[in-house]
Amino acid sequence: MRTIGFSLHHYQSILSKGKTTNNYYFPVLPFKNSIFTKTATFTVAAAQKSNEEECQRLLVVVGGGAAGIYGAIRAKTVAPKLNVVVIEKMKPLSKVKISGGGRCNVTNGHCVDTAILAEQYPRGHKEFRGSFFNVHGPMDTMSWFTSRGVELKVEDDGRVFPVTDNSSSIIDCLLTEAKSRGVNLQTGKIVKNAVTSADRKFIIKIEKPMANYREQIEADYLLIASGSNRQGYSLATQLGHSIIDPVPSLFTFKIQDPQLLELSGVTFPKVEAKLKLDNVRKNIPQLTQVGPLLVTHWGLSGPVVLRLSAWGARDLFSSTYKGQLIVDFTPDLQIEEMKSIISQHKSQFAKQKVLNSYPPKFLLVKRFWKYILGREGLSEDALWASVSNSSLIAISTLLKNCTFEVAAKGQFKDEFVTAGGVPMSEISLKTMESRIKPHLFFAGEVLNADGVTGGFNFQNAWSGGYIAGTTIGELANTSI
């Protein structure tokens, strides 16, 4: 594990590249709220100052998650005179709070190369090979947080967390920055409808759930960063976009094998696992993964399973989450080596029980060895001397090709990710602006882009929010 720290000189070099601007505070105009069925409208104010005409522009951000808050901050940073309002139904940054077991996996510190980084996205790996992460990648994200007082650490697998191991460090940083910039955050509200007027502005209707409360505002820019919430999909279709049907991604596998219950909690540092589905005939390289495996009380989990669930998300959905998982528990040993090792072990420990003695090179725990013997029908009390050569071969083969029946999908509480959303082809990744509707922007999981576990989904949110905020800020500046 490494602790991340960025010097002032390093951060100033980032500033010189135009990644942020000086810190100013400009209060935004408040909503002219009216309760019940009346409407409230944001008017465009004009005033003459120093012989220059200044017009108030408004950005409405739908969604107070990572992408929405980050994008709002960036837009306000680039264009301090821009009014920025974030509309969120629940508490802001609620997903940030629970991610990583409450620690918040901010990003991934091992994927500095953008080409390698892009490959971590089952949906988006082709599109992200371009400039997307070059504009604002993992190192930029880490610089952003550390420069604002959040000390970070990189764990052995590349995941980045605050040193406090508490997501509140990230949440407090974002909300403090948003407040200091003058971002207006309004919770307990939802955006119900959005249409464009003749002068290309957005007429947005906002409601408060469980209350007879409505308001209408007119915005110059609209950023939809609502995650996998259907509200965002609805707004996107109202404004002319299509939606790729969302399906779950990043989940565990429920396995049809009662004997696995006795192995709950057993971990394997390295296995090779292949997902086989009846509805997938072609060879998909990503449906074979190498990494740690965890046995749970309902089946199998761990990074290797989560990656398979992400890459196979759509095929698993169409197969009703049924298939076969073929696991190689000794990926660093060839089958012939396995046979030789187990044969030598038999000769050396002929008078010992097979349950109590097994080859250490297999790197197995006793509980799992017992499971393997049970699947092969070998008695735990049998002596090695009584084990036939055919049984030795069968044990070796089973360790190299152990098949589990996937019966359903489980849960993964650390991340809730969806595959699907607005097609990437309908936006420009250089600006995050819609190719269909000018001044409409998208960022985060509302797009058909999702990553494997390890901080990659948050990085998509930070990068998309940053690019969208930059573009909107620059547009606002040129219109003043």
Image (cartoon, helix red, strand yellow):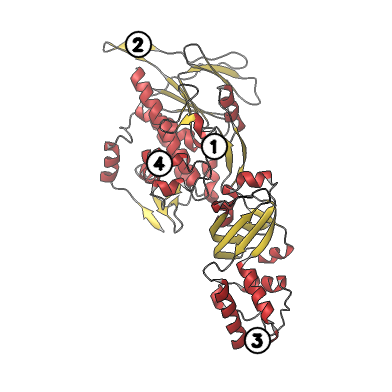
**Label 1 to label 2, Cα distance in Å?**
42 Å
Q: Which residue is mark 1?
A: 448
Residue type at mark 3 is: Gln
**Label 3 to label 4, Cα distance in Å?**
58 Å
Say if mark 1 contacts mark 3, CB within 8 Å.
no
Instruction: Please state which of the two labelled residues, at mark 1 or mark 2, is closer to the viewer.
Output: 1
Instruction: Please state which of the two labelled residues, at mark 1 or mark 3, is closer to the viewer.
Output: 1
Residue that extends furthest to the front in the rendered view of this protein: 282
Q: Which residue is mark 4?
A: 133
Instruction: Please state which of the two labelled residues, at mark 4 or mark 2, is closer to the viewer.
Output: 4
Judged from the image, the secondary structure of the residue bearing numbered disc 4 is: helix
Disc nearer the start of the sequence (4/1): 4
Residue 141 image offset from top left, x and y in percent = 39, 43
Judged from the image, the secondary structure of the residue bearing numbered disc 3 is: loop
Q: Which residue is mark 3?
A: 352
Residue type at mark 4 is: Phe
Disc nearer the start of the sequence (1/3): 3
**Label 4 to label 2, Cα distance in Å?**
39 Å
* Picture residue at 60% right of the left edge, 82% below the top: 343
Inspect this view and state whether residue 172 appears. no
Disc nearer the start of the sequence (4/2): 2
Disc nearer the start of the sequence (3/4): 4
